[in-house]
Amino acid sequence: MTVRRLENSRWGFESNCFVCDATNDRGMQLPFFHDDEADLVFAEYSLDAAFSGAPTYVHGGVTLAVLDEAMAWAAIAVGGKFAVTHETSATFDYPVRVGRTYRVEARLTEQTRERFRAEGTVLDAKGRPCVRAGCSLVILSAATALDALGTEAEGDDASYLK
């Protein structure tokens, strides 16, 4: 199994991503990884009370942001394309609690020339699915991706823009 850390700089751009950027002091700073053999993206994380909704639960919107980020990374790392969420849905089976460790996993389930379908799951320490999500992602053209990035991508892995 080959597991590689996913970093925006590998694809030739800097980011201030709320979910994954390690230098965003107001963000979650979640490190994402790509498991080549399993064809999935994952992160293990614990969030403090700054991300709560109810006092002991992580805010549902924050949990959705984690899932959205994981599915977007799956598009880049597994699908090899820069894509953004078009539509998403989620089912909350169990609360995601403040101060506990979780794992988010995401994988692509379908791919066409214009879109990906992805699924993501937040698992508790026992491996129980707490939140499940699915989404449709629109693959961006090179021009639209560069507009979104605000810069030319020049990294070794910038081929996702072609």
Image (spheres, helix red, strand yellow):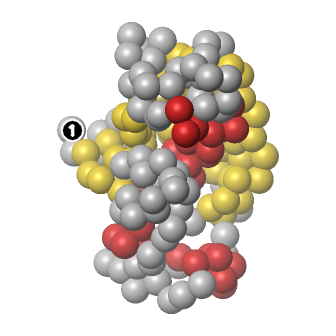
Q: Residue at x 70, y 53 (%)?
A: 85
Q: How many marks?
A: 1
In the rendered view, tell whether residue 146 sits above or below residue 127.
below
In the rendered view, tell whether residue 112 sits above or below residue 58.
below
Residue 50: quarter of image? top right
Residue matched to label 1 = 1
Q: Amino acid at mark 1?
A: Met
Pointer 1 local density, CA inside 10 Å: few below 14, some 14–19, many at least 20: few
- Asked which secondary structure carries label 1, the reply is loop
Q: Is residue 155 visible?
A: yes
Q: Is residue 141 left or right of residue 44?
A: right
Q: Residue at x 47, y 34 (%)?
A: 48
Q: Nearer the viewer, residue 54 or 129?
A: 54
In the rendered view, tell whether residue 120 sits above or below residue 101.
below
Q: Point out the image quarter for the N terminus.
A: top left
Q: Residue furthest left?
A: 1
Q: Nearer the viewer, residue 19 or 82?
A: 19
Q: Nearer the viewer, residue 39 or 45?
A: 45
Q: Residue at x 66, y 70 (%)?
A: 140
Q: Residue 57, image x and y in percent?
A: 60, 22
Q: Residue 121, image x and y in percent?
A: 54, 28
Q: Residue 34, image x and y in percent?
A: 35, 47
Q: Residue 54, image x and y in percent?
A: 67, 23
